[in-house]
């Protein structure tokens, strides 16, 4: 069969051309970007050779500084230097203050969501995160002579809820990055270790980062990484160990009220002290501020005593995850350590005692997540068509709906493998009722007030009927990224109810679109040109994907169907060349999509049938 | 029955978990959205739907009560959405007693032993009500199906007790 050929200078259409795809570890303290080259994952460095980019953004009146230089400015300019903003994603001010106590920022509300006041205006955690992502994107493009990034796998803590995941995705969109997948950090680490060792069996990934803690129990089997259970705490990390030391410094120096810049000094000293204690038994900390000079001695024993209750808290999550996985501690073959905070000796010894096994630290705990993400990005972008790797992840926290009396009814329980779809039926309780509101929550507790509110939906356009006669079927879908979407339908009439989503946290779609527009005008970027280019890339992707499918499965179509589909593809190829507006290409892509829907359905059915004939689809 | 066909296993309440798990992985390898990441958006949408259905089928087949309810509904007796209609005073009385016992567990002199003992009772009940299910669900007799429905209703109580017990165990762990 003759294949369509589209090629133009600098952009070959050869199906197995290596595409640039990256894995990004957007961390609380540090962020990294990695890619696969010649079959091996490696982290990309800046010009000075550093792989880690401090997740710090300093806002000045007319410029934005990201990374090391921003971090260095933190003590002088604490209010405008945003550190550990990942902890604020998808949160309210009240929650942040409750979790983290005193912080050197002035929080405010911007457009109905949380922001931080800086000299450059109100900055949302999403915007600040997008600056970090932009810096990493630039690093990757510079490393490959300006080659465009086709997509990125961005890691998130496994225990991130829907609002936090959505915020991360929004940040990527603002940074102009195509997200191939949000991947859970422990799963990424398991990929890096699993592909490294090739071992099979059950592994536990203990991931203690700067601001979050995750535990995942996975089963490795013939390239499949099946998450059996996950647990953790999305606001427990290295920063909390620092703040224990800050409190200790306060007690030892007798200084209780700290200004923003002295607080930042204490936090920096605490972090350095904690890191030094991983090597030394005793550390002397000098604290000089406001003309005062103090010396505080901290022994490892003292620190371990302070830290023990936090470490025990992580072990409780481990116990629950092991139980949720339906296994016993002895069945865990390997324990993998991830995150810089696992360098603390007290963490290593407690985890070793809990699992009765020496934990693995052979891959740098700071880089392992980015490396795993790069390996998956490489597969997802199509660079490894023969790979049999498959990651099956779970929903970390139960999803539920508010019912009478402020109680939560669970719709999808935690640790359900995703993607997943569940439907629930509701009825009206008044004659002629045409609207209904639903409150979606995430969490394990029974009371609405103890769970996280994700969104309030109002269903409108329900046909007027007698009370109890309408059957409204509400379907909750969680995709492979762990993101929730909701749809509703009245069953007897088939009327699609209109859903208005009001996210309780984070940003609405409109807000993201506005921010995107703003950022483009600010950068004096030609928005039209950028969108045109995006659509051209998308069109190329669509054509390549269809060609690859046709190359293997064109027999599923009869001659007429095949001809019609090919004609639409040829049209798209032509429009892609000639179009002057993104809308033209978009319409042509939609036409191809429609023309290929039957083909897609037949291919899917065929692949399901083939799967159980012991034949891989790729071999046919 | 679609779920059994999907996993290419015989329609039987007694299932072979190892085969199901093996076939599950093969199916996901074929349909999972990540295997279609560079396909058209139509392909991707289908992939998500199929993967979700396979996940749902697995959850249903793996869970003893959900599996029984599913088989029964395929036979035309759908009790999944019903409000409780169990009319067995003796059983309900026994349940109330067990519930009281459950609430006292936390205050037991030796909670671990009390929990273990209670767990054994639950297992016994589970066995009692599920032992006839396979035969009842395999029969062609409407009366047998109704008997199965009654057993499933009772099993639901038993599983609820088990969930409660788990919650109590969890809270003891946390102290």
Image: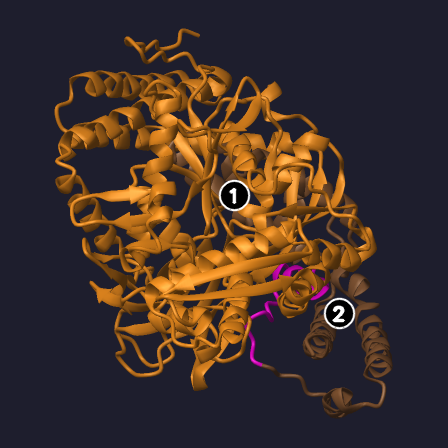
Of residues A44 and A303, the one drawn nearer to the viewer in this rendering: A303
Q: Is residue B73 magenta?
A: yes
Q: Which residue is mark 2?
A: B144
Measure the alpha-carbon separation of dots 1 and 2.
34 Å
Q: Is residue B6 left or right of residue A197?
A: left
Residue lying at 28% horizontally and 21% vertically, measured from the top left: A568
Report the span colored magenta.
Answer: B63-83
Q: Is residue B32 above or below residue B164?
A: above
> Mark 1–mark 2 contact, CB under 8 Å?
no
Chain coloured brown: which letter?
B
Q: Is residue A26 magenta?
A: no
Q: Is residue A271 above or below residue A96?
A: above
Q: Is residue A167 above or below residue A386?
A: below
Of residues B170 and A127, the one drawn nearer to the viewer in this rendering: A127
Residue lying at 75% horizontally and 35% vertically, measured from the top left: A199
Q: Which residue is mark 1?
A: B50
Percent x, y of residue B169:
73, 76
Chain coloured orange: which letter?
A
Within 10 Å of disc 2 (Cα), the crowding (few <14, some 14-19, many 20+) is some
Percent x, y of residue A299:
66, 62
Q: Is residue A503 left or right of residue A476?
A: left
């Amino acid at each position: 069969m003759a294949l369509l050929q589209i090629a133009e200078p600098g952009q070959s259409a050869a199906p197995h051309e290596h595409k640039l795809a990256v894995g990004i570890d957007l961390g609380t303290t540090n962020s990294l970007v990695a890619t696969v080259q010649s079959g091996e994952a490696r982290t990309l460095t800046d010009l000075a050779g550093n792989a880690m980019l401090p997740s710090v953004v300093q806002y000045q009146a007319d410029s934005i500084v990201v990374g090391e230089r921003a971090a260095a400015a933190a003590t002088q300019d604490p209010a405008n230097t945003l550190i550990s903003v990942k902890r604020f994603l998808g949160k309210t001010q009240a929650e942040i203050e409750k979790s983290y106590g005193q912080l050197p920022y002035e929080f405010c509300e911007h457009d109905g969501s949380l922001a931080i006041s800086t000299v450059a205006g109100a900055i949302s955690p999403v915007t600040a995160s997008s600056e970090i992502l932009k810096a990493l994107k630039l690093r990757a493009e510079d490393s490959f002579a300006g080659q465009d990034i086709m997509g990125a796998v961005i890691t998130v803590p496994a225990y991130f809820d829907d609002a936090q995941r959505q915020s991360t995705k929004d940040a990527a969109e603002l940074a102009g990055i195509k997200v191939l997948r949000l991947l859970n950090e422990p799963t990424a680490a398991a990929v890096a270790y699993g592909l490294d060792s090739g071992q099979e069996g059950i592994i536990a990934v203990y991931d203690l980062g700067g601001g979050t803690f995750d535990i995942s129990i996975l089963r490795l089997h013939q390239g499949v990484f099946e998450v059996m259970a996950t647990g953790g705490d999305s606001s427990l990390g290295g920063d909390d160990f620092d703040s224990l030391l800050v409190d200790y410094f306060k007690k030892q120096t007798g200084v209780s009220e700290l200004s923003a810049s002295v607080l930042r000094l204490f936090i920096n000293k605490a972090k350095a002290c904690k890191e030094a204690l991983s090597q030394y038994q005793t550390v002397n900390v000098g604290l000089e501020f406001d003309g005062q000079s103090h010396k505080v001695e901290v022994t490892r024993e003292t620190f371990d005593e302070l830290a023990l209750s936090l470490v025990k808290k992580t072990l409780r999550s481990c116990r629950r995850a092991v139980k949720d996985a339906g296994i016993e501690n002895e069945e865990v073959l390997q324990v993998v350590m991830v995150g810089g905070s696992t360098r603390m000796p007290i963490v290593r010894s407690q985890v070793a005692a809990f699992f009765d096994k020496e934990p693995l630290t052979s891959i740098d705990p700071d880089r392992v997540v980015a490396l795993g993400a790069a390996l998956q990005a490489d597969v997802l972008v199509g660079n490894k068509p023969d790979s049999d790797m498959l990651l099956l992840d779970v929903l970390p926290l139960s999803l539920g709906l508010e019912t009478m009396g402020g109680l939560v009814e669970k719709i999808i329980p935690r640790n359900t493998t995703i993607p997943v779809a569940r439907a629930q039926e509701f009825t009206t309780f008044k004659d002629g009722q045409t609207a209904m509101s639903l409150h979606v929550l995430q969490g394990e507790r029974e009371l609405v007030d103890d769970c996280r509110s994700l969104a309030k939906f109002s269903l409108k356009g329900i046909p007027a009927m007698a009370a109890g006669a309408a059957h409204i079927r509400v379907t909750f879908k969680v995709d492979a990224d762990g993101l929730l979407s909701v749809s509703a339908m009245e069953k007897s009439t088939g009327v699609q109810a209109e859903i208005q989503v009001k996210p309780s946290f984070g940003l609405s779609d409109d807000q993201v679109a506005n921010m995107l527009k703003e950022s483009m005008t600010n950068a004096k970027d030609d928005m039209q040109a950028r969108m045109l280019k995006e659509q051209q890339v998308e069109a190329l992707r669509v054509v390549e994907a269809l060609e690859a499918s046709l190359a293997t499965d064109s027999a599923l179509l009869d001659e007429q169907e095949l001809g019609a589909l090919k004609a639409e593809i040829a049209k798209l190829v032509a429009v892609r060349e000639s179009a002057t507006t993104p809308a033209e290409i978009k319409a042509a892509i939609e036409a191809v999509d429609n023309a290929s829907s039957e083909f897609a359905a037949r291919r899917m059915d065929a692949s399901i049938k083939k799967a159980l004939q012991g034949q891989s689809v790729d071999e046919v | 029955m679609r779920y059994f066909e999907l996993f290419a296993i015989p329609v039987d309440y007694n299932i072979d978990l190892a085969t199901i798990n093996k076939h599950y992985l093969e199916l996901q390898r074929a349909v999972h959205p990540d295997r279609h990441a560079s396909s058209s958006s139509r392909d991707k949408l289908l992939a998500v739907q199929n993967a979700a259905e396979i996940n749902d089928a697995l959850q249903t087949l793996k869970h003893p009560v959900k599996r029984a309810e599913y088989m029964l509904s395929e036979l035309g007796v759908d009790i999944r959405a019903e409000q409780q209609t169990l009319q067995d005073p003796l059983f309900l009385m026994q349940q109330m007693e067990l519930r009281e016992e459950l609430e006292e567990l936390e205050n037991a002199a030796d909670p671990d032993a009390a929990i273990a003992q209670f767990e054994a009772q639950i297992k016994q009940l589970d066995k009692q009500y599920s032992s006839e299910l396979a035969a009842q669900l395999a029969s062609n007799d409407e009366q047998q199906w109704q008997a199965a429905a009654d057993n499933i209703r009772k099993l639901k109580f038993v599983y609820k007790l088990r969930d409660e017990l788990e919650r109590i165990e969890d809270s003891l762990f946390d102290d």
